[in-house]
């Protein structure tokens, strides 16, 4: 069962992946350094499919794609937050990291709580208590299913964006 890793408000892209690690786009290297300063035990503790729950303005700061890439490479299934910084949200979708905005789940969870997520519906089950997050749009779903925006375009062409819109 996936577990919750809870973070607070205003988690910046520098907290997710410090700038000195942004000299590579190697997913393995980024995943190992994910939250290395803000929460040094994170990369060694997170397991494939775990979920990050954040507060307000998750992903604020620099516009680089390294932050959602690091989270995805660490094995995180999705990020649920009260709100997201706009560019982080878009970058997360483009690299295929599911992001769900849900205000009500934050106060109801703690680190280690069991969680399951239905990405398509935005449903979040925390120990049997169900929360409804925003549902992703059809373009976001198509990108996530393809892996990344680049993968979607490589396999289906630019027309895929219009086909699913």
Image: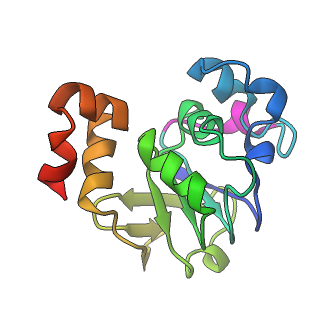
101 sits left or right of 108 in the view: left
Q: Quadrant of residue 55?
A: bottom right
Nearer to the camera, 130 or 30: 30
Q: Quadrant of residue 27?
A: top right
116 sits left or right of 158 in the view: right
Please, is residue 129 above or below residue 6 in the view?
below
Q: Which residues are magenta?
A: 41-48
Residue in the image at 58% along x and 62% along y:
86
Residue in the image at 35% along x and 38% along y:
149
Residue in the image at 34% along x and 69% along y:
135
Please, is residue 135 above or below residue 118 in the view?
below
Please, is residue 138 above or below residue 157 in the view?
below
Asked if one can make out residue 148 in the rendered structure from this viewpoint, the answer is: no
32 sits left or right of 134 in the view: right
User: Farthest residue in the right direction?
Assistant: 37
Q: Quadrant of the C terminus?
A: bottom left
Please, is residue 126 above or below residue 44 in the view?
below
Nearer to the camera, 50 or 159: 159
Inspect the magenta stretch and tell me whether residue 47 lies in it. Answer: yes
Inspect the magenta stretch and tell me whether residue 133 lies in it. Answer: no
Asked if one can make out residue 105 in the rendered structure from this viewpoint, the answer is: yes
From the top left corner, tell me how far across and down residue 116 is, in percent.
42, 58
From the top left corner, tell me how far across and down residue 6 is, in percent.
69, 60
From the top left corner, tell me how far across and down residue 57 is, in percent.
68, 67
121 sits left or right of 21 in the view: left
């Amino acid at each position: 069962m996936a577990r919750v890793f809870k973070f607070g408000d205003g988690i910046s892209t520098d907290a997710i992946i410090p700038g000195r690690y942004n000299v590579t786009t190697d997913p393995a290297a980024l995943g190992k350094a994910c939250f290395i300063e803000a929460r040094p035990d994170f990369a060694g503790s997170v397991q494939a499919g775990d979920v990050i729950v954040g507060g307000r303005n998750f992903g604020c700061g620099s516009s680089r794609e390294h932050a959602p890439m690091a989270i995805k490479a660490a094995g995180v299934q999705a990020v649920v937050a009260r709100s997201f910084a706009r560019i982080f949200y878009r970058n997360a979708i483009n690299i295929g990291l599911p992001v769900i905005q849900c205000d009500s789940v934050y106060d109801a969870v703690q680190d280690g709580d069991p969680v399951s997520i239905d990405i398509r519906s935005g449903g979040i089950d925390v120990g049997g208590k169900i929360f409804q997050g925003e549902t992703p749009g059809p373009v976001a779903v198509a990108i996530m299913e393809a892996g990344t925006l680049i993968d979607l375009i490589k396999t289906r062409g630019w027309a895929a964006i219009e086909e699913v819109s």
